[in-house]
Image (tube, helix red, strand yellow):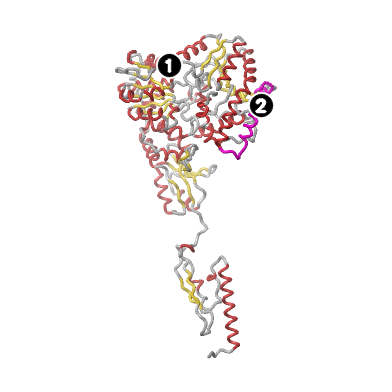
Amino acid sequence: MSTLTDEQRKMIEENKKAAQAKLAAKFSQKNNFLSTNNSLPGLSNINTQLQPNKLNRYKPLNVGLVLSPSPKAKAMHINYNVNNEKSKVTTNSKTVRGSCEITSKERFIVHVIYHQQLIEIFKTIPSKSYDPKSSQWSFLIKDHDLVMQSIKCLEPTVKIEKLPYSILKMIKENNLKEQDISKIDLSCLNAEMLNNIYPFQKTGIQFGVSKNGRCIIADDMGLGKTIQAIGIAMYYSDNFPLLIVCPSSMRYTWEEEIRIRMPNIPIPSIYVLSKANEHIINPAVVITSYDLMTKTKDLLMRLKFGVIILDESHSLKNEKTARTQVSLALAMQSNRCILLSGTPALSRPMELYSQIKAVTRSNFMTPIEYGKRYCNGQEAKYGWDFSGSSNMKELKVLLETQFMIRRLKTDVLKQLPQKVRNVVILDSCHLKNRTENMDNLEGMLNDKSLRKMQVRGALLEYFNHTGDAKLPAICDYIINLLKEGKKFLVFAHHQKVMNGICKILEENQTYYIRIDGRTSSEERKSVCDQFQSEDKFRVAVLSITAANSGITLTAANLVVFAELFWNPGILTQAEDRAHRIGQSEAVTIQYLLAKGTADDHLWPLIQSKLNVLNKAGLSKDNFKDDSTTVINENKKSSQRSILDFLDDDSDLNENNLRELDNIESQCKRKKKC
């Protein structure tokens, strides 16, 4: 029988309800109710028991709560384990991440946000340097390991990605072995050659020798890469036979150069391959095209060439193609490998990987390592996407110190005239009326709901229709040039545009030459000689893809592009058919553009690609420098930005570069292109 009075029972019941209410209220709050609740019996010291130690860890604590002095009241036990995985205490601080990038052959920078402790450590490094403009810290490359070791104490709060071991080792070894290449003795070369080359060409030969005959000569178009390659090959003549792989149209040009520069080589031992089943006996020099090289792989591998020259090496940009795989196999076998290209990367950094692999014999980064570091590699659903760019400063340093020598005309030939670009806005009165099909294609290009494959196809089709629409205005412009008595080159892409230009020239009784994909190697040389030597030949009608390299047409100082092309490297190569050694006058480049056509989309696309190449030092062109002007019918010349005439709502910009580069391969498969 209970001894409690009704009043006591009432008080206990009220206390119990009050305690339960307080307990429920504390559980509903974000903060731990035990840290502030001292009103319940037995909880007065809990707050002090739960103070975190220096490592922010808490010990398990079992708390017994007696809610009432009543004998019938039951004790309520709460287990509060703050180390439970579901109850871990999180800190407000996030992990600070950064990366390193080489910016010169001596220094590297650390890309990281502000962190007080990290900055204090940076200040202790002897070679430290701070740039207030970029807010970046830089250090000597020799102190890289010291920097990484010094900041190790901040892990895991601070994590800085190290420089790749292979790149760091390569740069360090180069700094240790660096030599004055001007002291390299070239007396083994014949005196006639040494006396007839420019000083910068001699430097190029010495650079190749300093790299043991494995290098990339990437000089600007027209600066004599052929002569430099022959000089390097002559230095290593003890390693002959020599294999020269070049575009088909260049085979006989190379043969002529070899005969002139290497008179000691018997003519019968110089072979120019024209078919796959030719017999070769004791060759000194073999010259072949990339297509024939692929077909004669077994024969060429058996000959075991000691020196190989790969001309226009940017054609090896895709490692999966047969020509690239055969070229790499021959390069690995050869003691010396010389690559030549005025535009080693036509669009993006990944195109350089196969060329670097050829000169290093695969003693370099793996494709994935290279792609992640320099191509902003992203792992997608169906594999890696290496169509971007990243760490361009470091790639530029790596190329210049390890593999490649590149000089621009403005750097080495002060006497060579300047190249000036003009954008010509064609008279809209002479444009064909827009068709309904063109309107539909324009709408597709601005429809952001479409898939990228659909947009790409629309641009390809739009580009084809643009040639038709522009042709009357192009012909009208060319007639005006003829009236001015100019001698010029005119580039086009579509056969129908080239045919239209030739027709208008014939109607105006103008002598001209034409080079397209159907022009043989022998005929190319013959018509080029005609244009160069005979004043009556006033116009050269040229295919952008078939005549952008391997020919010299310095008799003209005006180059007109009737159509655009999506690859900027091809355009700049074509420009330099006139702007090269032998040119005595300033060269003017004119791009004929029409508003309301595919030109509105292609021009910013070209600019976006050039911006990427400029960052890696692979191009000096930007198509919107101070020398660029826009010419309208009403205004002869108005100085303004080259992109001012374009619509701002064009959505085909750098975001679509990765997809649009496939247009070229698609276009080649279409008969109409």
| Label 1 secondary element | helix
Task: Check disc 1 and give the amino acid type.
Answer: Thr
Q: Nearer the viewer, residue 344 or 248?
A: 248
Is 504 on the left-hand or right-hand side of 269? right
Q: In this view, does 208 lie above or below 22?
A: above
Write the residue at 32% across / 28% down. Answer: 333
Q: Name the residue under label 2.
A: 434
Residue under circle 1?
Answer: 253
Disc 2 is placed on an element classified as: loop
Amino acid bearing label 2: Arg
Q: Give the range drawn in magenta.
A: 426-451
Image height check: is 264 above or below 116?
above
Q: Residue 424 is drawn in which quadrant?
A: top right
Graded by Cα atoms within 10 Å as few (under 14), some (14 to 19) or many (20 or more), the crowding at tag 1 reads some
Q: Is residue 231 above or below residue 180?
A: above
| Residue 620 in view in this figure | no
Find residue 108 and report its horizontal and vertical position in percent: 45, 41
Task: Kindly tell me whether residue 594 is visible in this rendering.
Answer: yes
Question: Any magenta on residue 195?
Answer: no
